[in-house]
Amino acid sequence: MAENFLKSQGYQIVQNWLAGKGFEPFGFQLETWQKFGRNYSGMVIAPTGFGKTYSVFLAVIIDFLNHPEQYRDGLQLLWITPLRALAKDIAKAMTEAIDEIGLDWKVSVRNGDTPQKERASQTKKMPEILIITPESLQLLLAQKNNQRFFKNLKCVAIDEWHELLGSKRGVMVELALSQILSYQKKVKIWGITATIGNLDEAMEVLIPYSIKKTKVVAKEKKKIDIFPIFPDEVEILPWAGHLGAKLVDKVVPVILQSNTTLVFTNTRSQAEMWYQLLLKEYPDFAGQIAIHHSSIDRDLRIWIEENLSSGYLKAVISTSSLDLGVDFKPVDTVIQIGSSKGVARFLQRAGRSGHSPFETSKIYFVPTHSLELIEVSALKEAVKQKIIEPRTPVVMSFDVLVQFLMTLAVGDGFEEKELFQRIKKTFAFSEITPEEWQSVLQFITVGGGALKNYQEYHKTIIENGIYKVTQRRIAMLHRMNIGVIVSDAMLKVKFVSGGYIGMIEEYFITRLKPEDKFILAGRVLEISHIKEMTVYVRNSKGKAIIPSYLGGRLPLTSHLSHFLRLKLSDSLQAKSSEKELKFLHPLLVSQEQNSHIPKDDEFLVEMIETRDGHHLFMYPFEGRLIHEVMAALIAFRISKITPISFSMAMNDYGFELLSSQPIPVDEAVLQKILSKENLIQDVLSSVNATEMARRKFRDIAVISGMVVQNYPGIQKNNKSLQASSGLIFNVLEDYSPENLLLKQAYAEVFNQQIDENRLMNAFKRIENSKIILKFANAFTPLSFPIKVDSLRQSLTSEDLDSRILRLQKESMKKNLSS
């Protein structure tokens, strides 16, 4: 069979084309081409830069060249990609290959950046290959007679499937695939992914159907070199944020000695800050570096991507907007500012450099405080052991299902019994019951039980057994609001004189006054005035505020947490070859002398008394989001013993409870408050689960169409959305507590915000650990960065700097005297 394939006309043509470019197919590419030709669906797993795109794309080309009689006019390959930044690059590579092979196929892109004229042209006559985002695919399905787009489709490829898998966008893809399969039963489904910890499950989510399917795993491995950037000296009492800025003079030479560098940050505000820092340190970078994130104007983003590909730009400072498989060949170096928060994300970003199979990916790690150097050691260990996080698939997200049913109803309508059978075959809704299905149908027709008296929720009607939307206004509003990414309301930023700059989050900009200055897209801008959803600005100079974004807090993964604890446990006994731990030796010695370094089977609790009050520090190393819940829980359990109030602070390593009263904690009390008994009941008592669910419900209400965010020329602001969804939440709580969307809000609080499983596992681990209680004279290297984070919330940057210096001096003096 393999021999016949190698002799086939299609393979010979593609093989000759590759040979002409000096390439030879990898084993996994060859296997994918053969399996595709034998009518398999499947998933390709390969490192970045090894040609995963060509494995599926060329499979379709070879099959067409071998069997042209089986292909009809129209769309042959639908390529779903999670990021708009990926689309243009993939289209360029595909077009080049098609032209050089000698086919007359057309490749087009369809996403939010595609001009209306081009979209209309595609609708009239589909290209052979269409590269599309999940949201734009849903918009296609919302068109009348949409079946015509897919009638000759041969393959759907889902790029970067690991990125979609753990999100509601992944559910959108699952539902869209079920619809496409109803039109074209013989279509092949191929996922393309980097390595994740649950590959079998990832394929089952994507292809839950009883069809021929296979996993194709590349044997090739990507070599990665990890280089930490060390400060000149170790800071015994480190604090988060400032160290990275101090290391800018060491980052500049790395950029200068590289062809092109991607500088990754975790937040848009950090990206803006680093753009300014690099220009200030090395003014000659002006015109040679750029900043890329999702709030920047589309045309500017496209310009940056094109000039990154051409090698014109020396460096681009980016958020996750350039995380995924964008093939920028000139990029030979990546710099990660601060914690990557996870092994998979770190490897993904590292893979953006050395984007060919035979190059080594180089990634430099710039710590934002000294302790993050332990993360470098932890990341190296995880990479060495080939440990990568799984992505947990999203299930039973009824808001996405409601949106999908409305999409079909706006399009050609649907027959409920046939659709129910299809929906049940998807992974996301395999457990849906007939009763839940009827509740969803009732919601889209009459608004469900509690909302049936409100006419605006009567959206679909049933005609001859077909559910459809007949009102133009409902259809228009639905199309305008398709998508599952609900961010905080964004305001446009424009010059008074004309010209669009980008977007800014409402919650940030509404705190500023006219003549205040802020930074966006690397420019210092002065506010003139705000009108409706637009901020009018002028160019300015001087000091300015860097915007903060609510979406900036990435959770530390449990896998990275595990390796962090291991590395810290062995830190004083670490081999001298571990440069990071060797460099941190003075800090680690100080921690051990003034308190304790917890071993892997220990749990450290520190008690410190200062002029601010009484401090209780705990170090679970489970990430900021889990620590928020744990801090509230421990405060609640202590207050049950003695009435006492606390303020709280936390970082990725631990949390602080601060009180003006002495905190009644000893070994016996610790055993009690750190118990896993009644854990969830106590969590519910310690955090306002109802208020958390209310906030979650806002997103669910927007996705399901209960609350409409976008109207023609208007976007509802965040405050208005919260008020509208809050009213509905109250009505459902009082009159319809069994409502599926209400129950979903509570489920998301437990699964995502509280992360019930991870919280329970953390308490099981703590219960099996030896609890070490230490009374320290002053702040320790582990506690100091948490203390600084609590101060940052209430002090200006100037006051913060002077306060930190004073605290450092006082603590060092006390620690030395002890």
Image: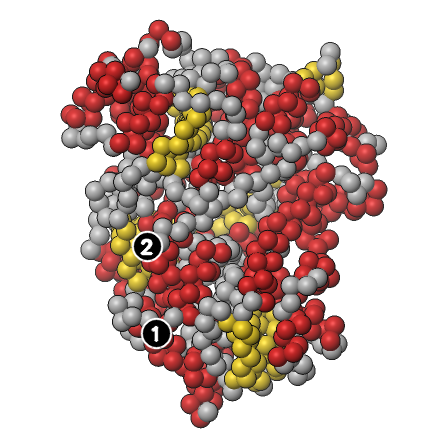
> Could you tell me the amino acid type at mark 2?
Lys
Q: Which mark is drawn over residue 778?
A: none
Residue drawn at (54%, 73%) of the image? 770
* Amino acid type of the residue that numbered disc 1 sits on in the rendered structure: Gln
Seen from the viewer's position, the closer of residues 658 and 534 is 658
The residue positioned 66% from the left and 83% from the top of the image is: 662
Q: Position of residue 578 (x, y in %)?
A: 29, 67
Find disc 1 in the rendering and name its residue: 573
Q: Is residue 244 above or below residue 722?
A: below
Q: Are marks 2 and 1 in contact (CB under 8 Å)?
A: no
The colour scheme is: secondary structure
Please rate how many residues cluster around mark 2, counting C-alpha atoms within 10 Å: few if below 14, some from 14 to 19, many from 20: few
Q: Closer to the camera, 599 or 206? A: 599
Q: Quadrant of the N terminus?
A: top left
Given the current orientation, which residue lies at the most extreme bottom position?
817
Dot 1: few (<14), some (14–19), or many (≥20) neighbours within 10 Å? few
| Observer able to see residue 373 | yes
Q: Position of residue 705 (x, y in %)?
A: 67, 34
- Badge 2 is on which residue? 384
Residue visible at 55% across and 79% down?
Answer: 773
Q: Position of residue 643 (x, y in %)?
A: 75, 76
- Dot 1: what SS? helix
Determine the CA span between mark 2 and mark 1: 20 Å
> Relative to 202, does residue 378 appear above or below in the rendering?
below
Q: Residue 429 is drawn in which quadrant?
A: top right
- SS state under label 2: helix
Percent from the top left, x then y, of residue 48?
32, 41
Residue at 43 percent across and 84 percent down: it is: 593
Please indicate whether residue 485 sits to the left or right of residue 214 in the image: right
